[in-house]
């Protein structure tokens, strides 16, 4: 019993900390912002009251360290309240706030990263936090404290309700058809049946009308219930203000700059899970704006800018999603530095049309901003790739624009709520998929003439913008068998996920609908491009695509390009030389499954014979074989006039650099080490060399 | 089944209090309030047998809530408070406003004092729920004019005179009564006054300060070996017996509790009798139990005088009643007349 009590006390204490710590922080920030004596006294009193309550709570929960910490802070504040000058008062208070926050996270088994919002946000570490004791109702105000988990459960139930209603809508449609079928039947029937049929017709009418009315009532009630529940999950954007102000303050201090952070659209109501997920990215962006964007005060003055840099974070609700824009009035992005960094990383800096957008896009790649930064300051900024990833996880998008010398503008678009999602249903490779509305910018139809081959892939221009064209089937690693007839226009979606945008060809667009998002559950291995599943009215389970994984797959290495619209299917022929039966069988089956035709040989001589007699599109050979080993075979191939340009892939257990070097010297096109045999590498390499099966 | 209302704004503290109380089979927690206004409303609605009252609450603090409850629907109130100076002061004010007892917040299950805190809370709650309260508006606050109800004439008793030291013992309702009595004494009261007040450990210092503010006399916590002075009142510190040495110095003793009490009224009155004989004056004020009877007997045997508070003015007519029934009371007076009697006893020559 005592263990249970101890757990409940800790859970209650965490709730009180989650409530009190933000209040302390706000008081500290207000004190820092400068306040007249009367206001100061009020703020100190408020802080003292909060600390006092937390101290008592800590005592009840037997958390001695926190009790002592609160007491110590109380003494400091009491001295300040009594008029004594206390150096570094705000620092000490903020340090205390951080310590209390960490304590709360520790007690609740949460990771100690972003601050919890208002009332504890959905805590992942559920096991440590038992549901607290019955929260009592405040009789006077009529407001209730409810654990987030309960609201989420109700929302899930509301979601089931939506699915059931959708199903009912479909049944209503059928009923209506049935009723229509009855109508007029009586007139056509022989006299004997007429009376009964008329009666049935009337019954059908009545039933249909009754069901319609019931459905309307259900729609009204359930719809209102769902909306109301969704609202419970909403918090105003303002919840983030204290955290962002704090970040700006600390970043400015660290960087020796001055900054004014202002928040606009504070009242925008946003799902708490979305708000929680936006915290991290927004703090990164604010930090980056201060660290990298804003110039040092002296330089700003020299440029005629106000000494204090301005960072504005603005939230605007647009229909079912919210745009959050972080703007700074700093120097913008140094494109030359970006180019230099790209070269340093071994990437070819984009050139020609659209290079600025492409250069800015590079900022979102891993490894770009975490090293010595692109603006020349020692890198303290956090990589924008992290921001892109976090935003993807809530089906959002992020885009960066800059005005040279005037500042940078980063826009995050995210859905307002995550419980239900408006999705576009598409088919590809014979299956149906759902794309969140926030991911689909627009739907277009592409004719074969719209596609231009560029560097191993295809591109098309839509709305004046040149974009990669990919096939959804290939993006998902499914066999691409387009159902469109050659020459027909194919539907495509302009998809933006993470920081990538591309045109994705599909077989058909089925429609749009409101979908209830269900997680994949723990038993399904994580698919980074599938963010959930939804149940359609007809009972089909449809995966919802999105997330960072989808964004990554939109990068177009060769091989994701769709099959040419009018070409016939082709199966490249591969000669496989491998002496081990097991390995040969395995490799053969892999290649065949991938769409290649395989001629297998147990040694180099046999392989040579097959190449001569039957010809091939590629040779895959082991190095160590009897009669003629892989290296010798390769040399022979390179010496032959006919087979000189044949792609040769050596697949071998020899992993040493020397061996690799020898293979390449012999003329191999590629060298795949099979100690950690990963079919993907072999297939990718083959595809690259041969263009892959159609 | 004793019905309890818990008023406490901190969720954690409330969880602990409710859990402790619920664990006792004779107690039933019938309601929980998170602020003073709610507490008042629930007392009206639920009529609990006793209220556990936090002193620091939003909307209406524990002190104001106590006043309202005692004025509108008198109910036994046990104040649960932290030991911070401000809180102790408020708690004592609440006692003055009619609350019956004050306890420190119980420590959580991990702490060493938890078991004892738990027992004490339950015992106090149960004990105070038995106290019958009579609606006496403004009883403990300084009356605007002389007492509304005329005090019954004192029973004919022994004339008191020649007092050279006074010992006052009190329990439930004591702090407010002490404040009233001491408040009416002059700064040059010639005899040293010893005070034994049954109160939870941790509150003695706050009590001394609170009493000191209310009287021209100087009230302080007794220090072992202190010389006795006129115009001084010596309050028993936490968890020690208070007495006086024949040399005329304060003597604190760590001897075991008597009748469960340390400080004990028996110890003080006996000690006064031994040291001052006929000059010893013992006063037994409102309180639960029988502490003081044995001491009063010893004091009278040594030639001293004993006064008991009357029933009408006592919050709990336990200790005084025991003394009276044992035939040990030389005088029985209402609280309002106590200060005058003390002056008379010390001024009138033997």
Image: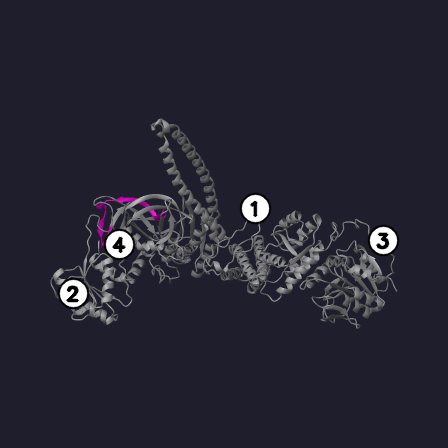
Q: Magenta residues? A: A434-458
Picture disc at residue A142: 1
Dot 3 falls on a residue whose secondary structure is loop
When the figure is inspected, residue B7 is found, relative to residue A171, above or below; the finding is: below
Marks 3 and 4 on same chain: no
In this view of the protein, which residue sits in the foreground, A600 or A131?
Answer: A600
Q: Residue furthest bottom?
A: B247
Picture disc at residue B153: 3
Dot 4 falls on a residue whose secondary structure is loop
Indicate which label's residue lies in the foreground, 3 or 1.
Answer: 1
User: How far across and down, in percent of the image, does residue A451 sit?
Assistant: 23, 48
Assess disc 1: are there few (<14), some (14-19) or many (≥20) residues with their C-alpha within 10 Å of its C-alpha: few
Q: Is residue B164 visible?
A: no
Residue shown at 24% from the left, 66% from the top: A583
Indicate which label's residue lies in the foreground, 3 or 2.
Answer: 2
Indicate which label's residue lies in the foreground, 3 or 4.
Answer: 4
Dot 1 falls on a residue whose secondary structure is loop
Dot 2 falls on a residue whose secondary structure is helix
**How many angstroms separate mark 3 from mark 1 (CA)?**
54 Å
When the figure is inspected, residue A425 is found, relative to residue A605, above or below; the finding is: above
């Amino acid at each position: 019993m005592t263990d249970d009590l101890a757990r409940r006390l800790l859970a209650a204490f965490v709730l009180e900390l989650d409530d009190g710590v933000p209040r302390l922080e706000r008081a500290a920030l207000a004190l820092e912002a400068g306040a007249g004596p009367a206001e100061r006294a009020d703020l100190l009193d408020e802080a003292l009251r909060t600390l006092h309550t937390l101290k008592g709570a800590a005592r009840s929960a037997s958390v001695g360290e926190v009790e002592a910490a609160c007491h110590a802070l109380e003494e400091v504040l009491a001295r300040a309240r009594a008029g004594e000058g206390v150096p570094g008062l705000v620092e000490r208070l903020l340090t205390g706030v951080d310590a209390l926050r960490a304590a709360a996270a520790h007690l609740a088994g949460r990771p100690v990263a972003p601050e919890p919002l208002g009332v504890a946000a959905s805590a992942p570490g559920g096991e440590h936090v038992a549901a607290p004791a019955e929260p009592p109702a405040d009789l006077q105000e009529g407001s209730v404290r409810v654990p987030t988990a309960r609201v989420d459960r109700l929302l899930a139930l509301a979601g089931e309700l939506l699915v059931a209603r959708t199903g009912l809508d479909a049944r209503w449609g059928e009923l209506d058809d049935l009723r229509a079928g009855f109508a007029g039947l009586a007139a056509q029937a022989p006299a004997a049946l007429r009376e009964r049929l008329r009666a049935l017709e009337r019954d059908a009418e009545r039933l249909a009308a009754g069901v319609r009315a019931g459905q309307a009532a259900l729609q009204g009630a359930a719809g209102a219930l769902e909306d109301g529940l969704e609202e419970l999950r909403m918090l105003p954007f303002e919840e983030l203000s204290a955290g962002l102000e704090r970040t700006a303050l600390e970043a400015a201090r660290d960087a020796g700059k001055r900054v004014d952070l202002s928040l606009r659209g504070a009242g925008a109501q946003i799902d708490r899970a979305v708000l929680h997920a936006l915290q991290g990215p927004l703090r990164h962006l604010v930090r980056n704006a201060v660290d990298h964007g804003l110039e040092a005060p002296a330089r700003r003055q020299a440029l005629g800018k106000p000494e204090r840099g301005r960072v504005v974070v603005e939230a605007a609700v647009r229909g079912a999603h919210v745009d959050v824009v972080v703007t700074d009035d700093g120097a913008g992005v140094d494109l030359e530095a970006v180019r230099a960094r790209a070269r340093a990383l071994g990437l070819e800096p984009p050139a020609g049309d659209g290079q600025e957008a492409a250069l800015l896009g590079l900022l979102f790649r891993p490894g770009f901003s975490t090293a010595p930064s692109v603006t020349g300051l020692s890198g303290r900024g956090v990589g924008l790739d992290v921001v892109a990833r976090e935003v993807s996880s809530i089906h959002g998008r992020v885009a960066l624009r800059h005005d040279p010398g005037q500042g940078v503008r980063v826009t995050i678009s995210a859905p307002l709520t995550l419980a239900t999602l408006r999705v576009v249903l598409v088919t590809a490779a014979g299956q149906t998929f759902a794309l969140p509305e926030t991911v689909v910018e627009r739907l277009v139809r592409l004719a074969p003439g719209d596609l231009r081959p560029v560097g191993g892939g295809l591109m098309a221009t839509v709305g004046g913008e040149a974009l990669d064209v990919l096939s959804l089937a290939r993006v998902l690693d499914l066999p691409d068998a387009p159902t469109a007839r050659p020459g027909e226009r194919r539907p495509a979606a302009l998809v933006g996920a993470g920081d990538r945008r591309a045109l994705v060809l599909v077989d058909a667009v089925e429609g749009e609908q409101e979908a209830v998002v269900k997680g994949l559950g723990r038993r399904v291995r994580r698919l980074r491009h599938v963010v959930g599943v939804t149940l359609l009215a007809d009972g089909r389970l449809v995966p919802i695509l999105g997330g960072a994984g989808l964004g990554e797959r939109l990068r177009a290495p060769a091989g994701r390009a769709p099959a040419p619209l009018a070409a016939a299917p082709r199966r490249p022929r591969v000669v496989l030389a491998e002496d081990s039966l097991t390995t040969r069988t395995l490799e053969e089956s892999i290649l065949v499954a991938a769409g290649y035709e395989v001629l297998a040989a147990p040694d180099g001589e046999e392989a040579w014979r097959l190449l001569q007699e039957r010809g091939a599109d590629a040779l895959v050979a082991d190095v160590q074989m009897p009669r003629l080993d892989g290296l010798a075979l390769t040399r022979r191939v390179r010496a032959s006039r006919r087979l000189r340009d044949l792609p040769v892939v050596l697949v071998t257990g020899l992993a040493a650099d020397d061996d690799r070097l020898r293979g390449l010297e012999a003329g191999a096109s590629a060298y795949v080490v099979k100690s950690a045999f990963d079919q993907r590498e072999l297939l990718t390499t083959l595809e690259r060399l041969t263009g892959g099966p159609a | 089944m004793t019905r309890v209302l818990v008023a406490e704004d901190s969720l954690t503290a409330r969880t602990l209090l409710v859990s402790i109380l619920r664990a006792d089979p004779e107690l039933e927690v019938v309601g929980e309030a998170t602020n003073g206004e709610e507490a008042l409303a629930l007392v009206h609605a639920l009529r609990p047998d006793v209220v556990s009252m936090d002193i620091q609450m939003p909307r209406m603090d524990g002190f104001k809530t106590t006043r309202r409850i005692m004025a509108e629907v008198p109910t036994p109130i046990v104040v649960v408070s932290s030991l911070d100076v401000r809180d102790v002061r408020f708690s004592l004010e609440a006692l003055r406003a009619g609350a019956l007892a004050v306890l420190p917040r119980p420590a959580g299950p991990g702490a060493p004092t938890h078991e004892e805190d738990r027992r004490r809370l339950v015992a106090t709650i149960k004990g105070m729920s038995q106290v019958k309260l009579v609606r006496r508006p403004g009883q403990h606050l300084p009356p605007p004019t002389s007492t509304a109800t005329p005090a019954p004439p004192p029973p004919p008793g022994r004339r008191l005179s020649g007092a050279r030291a006074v010992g006052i013992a009190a329990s439930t309702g004591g702090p407010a009564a002490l404040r009233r009595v001491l408040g009416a004494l002059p700064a040059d009261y010639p005899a040293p006054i010893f005070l034994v007040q049954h109160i939870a450990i941790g509150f003695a210092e706050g009590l001394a300060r609170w009493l000191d503010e209310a009287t021209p006399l100087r009230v302080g916590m007794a220090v072992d070996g202190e010389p006795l002075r006129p115009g001084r009142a010596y309050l028993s510190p936490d968890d020690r017996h208070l007495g006086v040495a024949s040399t005329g110095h304060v003597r604190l003793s760590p001897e075991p509790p008597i009748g469960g009490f340390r400080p004990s009224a028996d110890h003080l009155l006996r000690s006064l009798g031994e040291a001052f004989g006929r000059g010893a004056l013992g006063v037994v004020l409102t309180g639960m139990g029988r502490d003081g009877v044995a001491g009063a007997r010893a004091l009278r045997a040594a030639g001293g005088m004993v006064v008991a508070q009357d029933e009408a003015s006592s919050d709990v007519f336990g200790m005084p009643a025991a003394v009276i029934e044992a035939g040990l009371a030389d005088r029985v007076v209402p609280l309002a007349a106590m200060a005058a009697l003390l002056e008379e006893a010390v001024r009138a020559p033997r």
